[in-house]
Image (spheres, coloured by chain):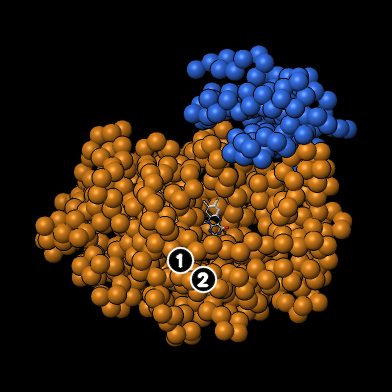
Amino acid sequence: MSIFFLTQRQLSTLRAAADRIIPPDETAGAAEAGATDFILRLQNNELSAHQTAYAQGLNKIDEQATTQFAQLFADLAPAQQDIVLQAIERNHAIFFRMLVEHTLEGFYADPSNGGNRDAVSWKMIGYRAEGGIW
Amino acid sequence: MNDFDAIVIGTGAAGGIVAAVLAEAGQRVLLLERGADNPSPESPRDHLRNQRLSIYGHNAGPDISDHPRIAVAPNGTTSLVHPHEPGYQNNAACVGGGTRVYGGMAWRFMPQDFRMATTYGIPAGSSLADWPITYDDLEPFYERAEWEIGVSGATGADKFAGPRKKPYPLPPVDSNPERIALERGAAKLGLNTFPIPLLINTIPYNNRPACGKCGMCIGFACPTNSKNGTQNTMVPRALATGRCMLVTGAMAQKVHTDPRGNATAVSYFVNDKLQTHTAGMVICSAGAIESARLLLNSATVHHPHGLGNDFDQVGRHLQGHTYTGAFGVMPEPIFDGQGPGVSIATTQFNHHNPSIVGGGLLANEFIKLPALFIKWAMPPGQPRWGLAAKQYARENYRRTIHVQGPTQDIPNPEARVTIDPQIRDRWGIPVARLSGTTHPETIRTANFLRHRAEEWLTASGAKKVWSYPPQLQLSAGQHQAGTCRMGNDPKTSVTNSWGQIHGCENLYVIDGSLHPTNGGFNPALTIMALAFRSASYLIDRDQ
Ligand SMILES: Cc1cc2nc3c(=O)[nH]c(=O)nc-3n(C[C@H](O)[C@H](O)[C@H](O)COP(=O)(O)OP(=O)(O)OC[C@H]3O[C@@H](n4cnc5c(N)ncnc54)[C@H](O)[C@@H]3O)c2cc1C
């Protein structure tokens, strides 16, 4: 198993999609917080069985992007990306639900899981906003 | 001469107590625990791998690959499940058992909970039964559990509780903004509320410090050792006598019996090597599912259906709690981040509900970890992704209240543990097969309760309130109970009121398995009280 089960293109699609699931605003979005690193780490451990589903699902996102907007997903404007993801949510519901749940898990779990850098989501919602001993 | 006077299998809520009481009375005890002494030292505080949210693993056992079970879904589908997966009905496996990682709510059952059949009649298809003992019989042992393990609470504040002779040893947890809001709502509705009794040190006790308020009580071992379980009270007391030998990583395989069914020895695996030790008595305290499995797996030519199972009772009446409740979003933040967080309850709806069998307590929640908030506490229809979802979490994490509680399960004989004919664990021991569902009456009660939770939240000022209908499914899990019920009639129960298997001299079950019914309360304090009561009988009897 390697971290290279995804191509560079699939990786950038993953990062771009994660950033529409939890977009950056006045605080970090999913990609900056590391949620995609969390997902990759899972794929290499507990979720290795989902590697193919991920690779295929990310391809579907790019196919949808090319069909609708004649560009790769990562190169689209955020509003266009949302339209693409809505189509994916309708037509590839299982994959999309998995992608959303994994992104949320990474972003909101403890920083040592790798997807919540500097406890950015915790500070955002007010859980241990002042930091903690644990 | 026997190797030991007694062998106790399991170091959980019950086993730790039995071992200590016996050893302190002079007996030589072998205490077996399949789990480790210190569960998950490498990642004890993983929000995705713990005993509450175990998506990718957990932190207090049992080992994920060594201990499969078979789960039979309500539609009959059979699946092989691992300990962290849905359907497994896991509790924990480590020194302290469930008490290592529990939330520590320390409830006494109410007097009516020991008299369910008499109070309500027996619903068709259910095996609702009275206990062979009353609240008054257990009261002195609740007191021992509260003082010897350590419980904080507000004495006398629960006006529906049974009578007690001694106050709680520790003062109640502090109030918080959430509790103040819920008190306001309760006052409008005329509900009696009070601080939740907890097995948590609010001040130093038993040479251990007061709670550090980290807010990771439920599903985690306590980092300041301020949460009281058997691992930091009774097990150390047992070991301090010098007469108790604790073996961890010891998986009991079989209880050996003579033709009459009296216990002679226990075989267990340590490091995959089979050992056998003889003893004057054997106590199964492996938890409701594993104690039943062990008795069924200990069949002999004289007891071909398993020990204590001449009347096909072992493993039946499996029950736990159907959790129910509601969520509410408050206009202002009510979250102060201070653990344990859980701080207010009512027992107003445990009984006396018009045309409802039983009921259950309602309480606010422990500090909700963010990952759990995202998974459980989004209102229906709330988008799970996009900027709106992020903003929702940002605005409402500190405003959301979750009121919930354990519905008293109405037991039925078809909810049960059997032995799977094919699947074996790492050591070749046939695994538990779990089938059946709770009784439909449980669901009716749970629905009643969730509407009370909604009313409470609305009266407390929540601007948005929602809940989910409970499902008819098997209820066991962390509150598992009932599989070796005690009673007076050997045809309808497995043990007498001391946990002694009917017809046997020296074979006992002492753990959640004994509960004929499981109350509308978290069960650990009752399991502890029963363990003190039975263990006292064992030492009196031997003198
Ligand atoms: C996250 C969580 C939160 C909880 N919160 C609360 C709460 O707030 N209040 C409350 O009252 N209850 C709570 N509980 C439930 C409580 O922990 C259980 O009711 C209680 O621990 C059950 O006691 P027991 O003695 O029946 O079994 P356990 O405590 O489960 O102990 C059984 C022990 O036997 C061992 N064992 C099993 N099979 C074998 C074998 N073959 N060989 C050797 N050893 C074996 C197990 O590893 C285990 O350690 C919670 C549980 C969990 C997991």
- Identified by mark 2, the residue type is Thr
Q: Quadrant of residue B412?
A: bottom left
Mark 2 CB near ligand 1 (8 Å cut):
no
Disc number at residue B304?
Answer: none
Q: Nearer the viewer, residue B131 or B385?
A: B385
B177 versus B409 height, above or below: above
Q: Is residue B398 left or right of residue A91?
A: right
Disc number at residue B438?
Answer: 1
Asked if residue B499 shows in the view, the reply is yes
Residue B257 position, x and y percent, is: 17, 57
Q: Chain of mark 1?
A: B
Secondary-structure class at tag 1: loop
Residue B120 position, x and y percent, is: 48, 84
Q: Quadrant of residue B456?
A: bottom right
Instruction: Identify the chain drawn in blue.
Output: A
Residue B229 position, x and y percent, is: 52, 53
What hue represents chain B? Answer: orange
Q: Is residue A63 left or right of residue B44?
A: right
Q: Nearer the viewer, residue B513 or B194?
A: B513
Secondary-structure class at tag 2: helix
A11 versus B36 height, above or below: above
Q: Nearer the viewer, residue B526 or A22?
A: A22
Q: Are marks 2 and 1 in contact (CB under 8 Å)?
A: yes
Q: Residue at x 45, y 70 (%)?
A: B439
Q: Quadrant of residue B185?
A: bottom right
Residues at marks 2 and 1 on the same chain: yes
**Which corner quadrant holds the C terminus of chain A?**
top right
Q: Callout 2: 10 Å neighbours few (<14), some, many (20+)? A: many
Q: Residue at x 83, y 62 (%)?
A: B463
Q: Which residue is mark 2?
A: B442
